[in-house]
Image (cartoon, rainbow, N blue to C red):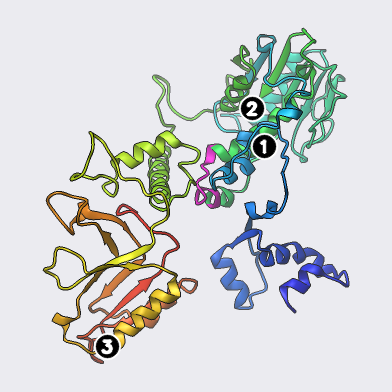
Amino acid sequence: MSLKKIARNPHRDALYDVVGPLAHRVTSAHYEVWADQSQYERLIRGETEGTLRTYSLLKPSAFQGFKGVLVASACMPDTMFYRLFTAQGIVFEPAASLARDLRYHTHEHGERIIILYAGEEPWSKRYRDRKLDGQDATVLDQIQAAVGDLVGDEPFVWMGNTDLSDGFFAQPGAARLPNTPHGLNSYQGYHNVVVLSALNPPPAHFGFMEGRGINGEEMRTAHYRTAVYQAVMRISIRNPADATPKRVVAMDRDTAEWLAGLFPGAKVEPLPGMGLVPRKGKAGRPRKHASDAVKTKENRDKKKRELLAQLDLINGTSLVTGRYPFFGQEVRESMREFVCNENTLKERDIVTPKTAPQTCGTAFGSIFDRSPLDHVDHEDDDSFVAGLRALHQRVVAKEDAGVFAPAHFDPNKAAETARGLDNVTHLRGIWLDNDGGDLSHNEFAALFPYLRVVVWNTASATAEKPRWRAFVPTTHAMSMDV
């Protein structure tokens, strides 16, 4: 049974109804689909227990052929759609003809709004259900009581996860919002809103999106904070003519401050009655990082963003630099690949590639030559591997074989060297040299079943002492740091 037939499911098979959407995305030219490698390996081995987690991203090609595409969204720059597409060079322009009919373009009268937050920690179900120190009550129990004391007999709306009953708040004036309240106008008579929902994606989603250049805070904003905004906008805040003071209860300080940024003039205050909520850290001057682990992760994330930015700069892409152009400029100025010491026109001049590099290495006549014989063109992986195979079949003396380096050396890039590190503009591929040990080339390749690994013996290899080299193609050229 082909994936295309499963996707079509002409006979409405119940199983195909479940797997059909995935089959459609896998076979579509407009989606990129990833799968958890270990889970996929278990699947193809025939292990029936377990799950297969996949991730699918829509490609801009889905909109080719249309004269125009209109996308409407609140908080557009914070959406995953916007961030992922702009990283690929897609430019979004305001629809001026429609903008004229909008009720407002930015929120006014923020001074009417007080945003109260229940805690300092990022909101999650795990934190919500944590026991208070020395008590049987949970953080959620204390929030429930604090909200009751805050609103008293005033009516309010609230939104929460489905595991909370409709009667979670005992006050007669409490009205529950649907979990997807977008666009509803029937709650404009309320002036108080409480958003209890914890809407974080699974941890694996964060790891996957980090690989696409989206950090954890951007994920939380796109999935959680924009949903909080939708709930908040159901009450009288959506009516600029309503001068009644409004109160918003958010669950964590970061979300409260993010909301306040959308309503200039709004006040941010802690929710009264939450003094017993457990918080990370010790008394005294607050730390910049909640723990050493958080500090380490932040440094690791910063380094990852820097390396991704280097890939952008080398290949002419915009995964990171499209969203953080000043960061991209800062990274560029620190990269040796872009510094030109010999032909600079003025201080801090840099060499900027306009397109992705089209070479995959440099050939020299011997190890002593300073100037290259040529730069090796990169058409595609198949052509390059075919060239390696042809070279391997030649029989020449080692000293006559020449030298190949996977780095592109520009002899005019540096004043003092011709093929030193300062002459490198980019590298392509992963190259390994095994001169001994008990790891065979077959065992090495088996470690990476989904990578293309090209292996060949060296000139000095024997049956007793096998020596081999390996080449792993990469989809992009790389910087030296990467």
- Nearer-N-terminus badge (1/2): 1
Residue 464 within the magenta-colored segment of the rendering: no
> Which corner quadrant holds the C terminus?
bottom left
Q: Residues within 10 Å of mark 1 (few under 14, many from 20)?
A: many
Residue named by callout 2: 251
**Residue 77, located in which quarter of the rendered image?**
top right
**Which residue is most to the top?**
243
| Amino acid identity at mark 1 | Ala
What is the spatial separation of the Cα atoms under label 1 and label 2, in whole angstroms?
9 Å
18 horizontally vs 316: left or right: right
Q: Residues within 10 Å of mark 3 (few under 14, many from 20)?
A: few
> Which corner quadrant holds the N terminus?
bottom right
What is the spatial separation of the Cα atoms under label 1 and label 3, in whole angstroms?
64 Å
Secondary structure state at the residue bearing disc 1: loop
480 horizontally vs 105: left or right: left
| Amino acid identity at mark 3 | Arg
**Residue 38's x, y, as percent?**
54, 67
Secondary structure state at the residue bearing disc 2: loop
Q: Is label 2 in contact with label 3 (beta carbons under 8 Å)?
A: no
**Residue 205's x, y, as percent?**
59, 50
